[in-house]
Image (cartoon, grey):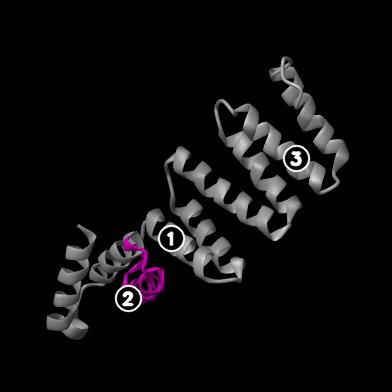
């Protein structure tokens, strides 16, 4: 019920003025993001981060800001900073791996295959059971970066774990 949440939050903002709790801006931002109003969502996340005390911030808040910046700002370095904050704040291993994957994809999009490879290696090392796709993406990032010796080593891992597949 995002539209209702937006309406309710705007009503609270109208009545409370400057005395509003920062979490109202967070509620507004999340709801706006889910309805596709990324510009307003980013504006409200900025207000939220400006007014909220640091100890109340959670990784998902950093992630939302990163996603909004990734979508709206051609300068991907800002999204990278916020994904890194999300990664640092997160305790759940699966969520951390998701942030690493987002960082790797941004680096790939930027053509920085060396940094992409570093993130792909982090994903490989963080997972208890890395998949063939994890290894393949790591190897391809190294290959694209022309780090052929390391790419060969990674594809050797692939070949050893998945001898029936041609990608190694």
**Dot 3, how many residues are within 10 Å of its Cα: few (below 14), some (14-19), or many (20+)?**
many
Callout 2: SS: helix
Callout 3: SS: helix
Front label number (1 vs 3): 3
Tell me what residue is drawn at x 51 percent, y 64 percent.
Answer: 71
Per the model, the C-alpha gap separating discs 2 and 1 is 14 Å
**Dot 1, how many residues are within 10 Å of its Cα: few (below 14), some (14-19), or many (20+)?**
many
Residue 155: give x, y in percent of width and height.
Answer: 78, 29
Q: Give the range drawn in magenta.
A: 35-55
Which one is earlier in the sequence, the residue at label 1 or at label 3?
1
Callout 1: SS: helix
Q: Residue 95 carries which label?
A: none
Q: Which mark is residue 51?
A: 2
The quarter of the displayed image where residue 46 is located: bottom left
Can residue 95 be found in the magenta stretch? no
Tell me what residue is drawn at x 23 percent, y 69 percent.
Answer: 24
Residue farthest to the top, as pictured: 164
């Amino acid at each position: 019920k995002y539209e209702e949440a937006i309406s309710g939050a705007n009503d609270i903002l109208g009545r409370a003025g400057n005395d509003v709790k920062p979490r109202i801006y967070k509620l507004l931002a999340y709801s706006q993001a889910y309805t596709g109003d990324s510009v307003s969502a980013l504006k409200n996340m900025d207000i939220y981060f400006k007014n909220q005390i640091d100890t109340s911030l959670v990784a998902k808040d950093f992630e939302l800001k990163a996603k909004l910046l990734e979508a709206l700002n051609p300068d991907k370095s800002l999204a990278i900073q916020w994904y890194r904050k999300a990664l640092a704040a997160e305790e759940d291993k699966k969520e951390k791996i998701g942030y690493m994957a987002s960082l790797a994809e941004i680096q790939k999009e930027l053509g920085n295959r060396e940094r992409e490879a570093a993130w792909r290696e982090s994903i490989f090392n963080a997972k208890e059971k890395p998949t063939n796709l994890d290894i393949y993406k790591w190897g391809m990032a190294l290959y694209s970066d022309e780090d052929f010796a390391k790419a060969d080593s990674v594809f050797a891992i692939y070949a050893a774990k998945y001898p029936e597949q041609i990608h190694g």
